[in-house]
Image (spheres, grey):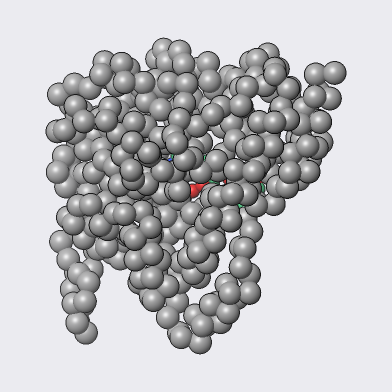
Amino acid sequence: MLVIGKPLILNKELFLKRVEDILDSGIFSNNGPYTEYLESFLKEYLGVKYVVAVNNATSALDICLAFLKTKHPFGQIVVPSFTFVASVHSIVRAGFEPVFADIDDNFCLDMESVDARVNPSTVAIMPVNLFGNYNNPANFARYRDLFIINDSAQAFGVFLEEEDQYAGTFGNCEIMSFHPTKLAGGFEGGIITTNNSEIAEFAIQYRNFGFTPNAGPQGEIGPIIGTNYKINEIQSCAILTQIENLEEIQSHYYDCFAAYRRLLPDWIKLIQPNVYFSNFSYIVAKVHPKLRDGLVNYLYSAGIFARTYFSPIHRSKPYAERFGHLELPNTDKLASECFCLPTGLHITPEDCVKIVDKIKEFLN
Ligand code: T4K
């Protein structure tokens, strides 16, 4: 099956050697040397003050929201309905109320829609940066009093030319994913990035049950009611080994995008990311809604697993009763036309040719 993001550790030899080191060291988890090195590598690379690594990006979202809870026990959070379900579930699990906003043609929050939803009960906005696009940070400057959590699970490696910064440095905090299907993915993993020391210290304690770090032999249960969101050493080492080869990974992803751009017929519109330097980790295309599901099913039966990311969350089972009536026109439009094409380190330019041939065959 040709899928999206089938993982491949590029430098397998080095990875296996490091796994041996881990086995010999007897330090398997709880902020071991690979986790510390990963965090300092990413701090440097992203140009951000603090990076806290956790077991996946959903945990990272939970932590940011638990931090927000210490400031605002209740309130509304504006979030797009067009996102992966983790964004919204985290908001609800933390005891906040999601307020669904519409998106623009690059899957970023539509600011008119946001403006119409912000009210005195709003405590935060969660822009979601999908498919290598990025919400313009300048748009959120007018919401200085609100907490901005960027869900950048898919945005690792995205660079914003005007700001001269990588994704990971905007809003109050950002989260990123290293799920196997992500750019530089490993055996799951996530990070919180922030320039705020209070958020970073909270995250460090929260991921380890709330214990105060370096509290000596007795340990100290700190004031934070945390949980176990620790990343283990094999997870950290896999991510580290991947990001050391980031240039090669990124150029492979770009080559896939360029191959599709060259080959796709004109009844399929490839969406060009809205940033100068995208990560191309998802390749998203639009097709007439009447053709979309038939095409995706046809490809699936030919061993090509394109995905119809994403269905509107406000109409999904947990939310439909309360929110299903909401009108989010661009969300509905894009959710009916878009699909993501197979990409990743296992997909070769020859695979792209095969996939596009099948796409053309479908219409014939
Ligand atoms: N926010 C946003 C905006 C996100 O997109 C995500 C995750 C999150 C938050 C949360 O991040 P994490 O907590 O996951 O770190 C996937 C992923 O599970 C999820 O990480 C991702 N977004 C989402 C967009 O896609 P599925 O259900 O499509 O993935 P899965 O595991 O079924 O795999 C998809 C395909 O990849 C399969 O066809 C097979 C292939 N695959 C998968 C794995 C895990 C492999 O070939 N090898 C593998 O090891 O959700």
In this view, the residue in front, 259 or 269, is 259
Seen at 58% across and 19% down, the residue is 336
Seen at 52% across and 57% down, the residue is 246
In this view, the residue in front, 337 or 226, is 337
Q: In the rendered image, which quarter contains the N terminus?
A: top right
> Residue 298 at what x, y percent from top left?
78, 28
- In the displayed structure, 297 sits above or below 279; it is above
213 sits to left or right of 359: left
User: Residue 118's image quarter?
Assistant: top left
56 sits to left or right of 127: right
184 sits to left or right of 78: right
> Residue 128 at what x, y percent from top left?
39, 35
Q: In the rendered image, which quarter contains the C terminus?
A: top right
Res 133 visible: yes
> Residue 238 at what x, y percent from top left?
52, 66
> Residue 267 at what x, y percent from top left?
70, 17
User: Residue 117's image quarter?
Assistant: top left
Seen at 57% across and 72% down, the residue is 15
- In the displayed structure, 22 sits above or below 362; it is below
In this view, the residue in front, 252 or 63, is 252
- In the displayed structure, 217 sits above or below 223; it is below
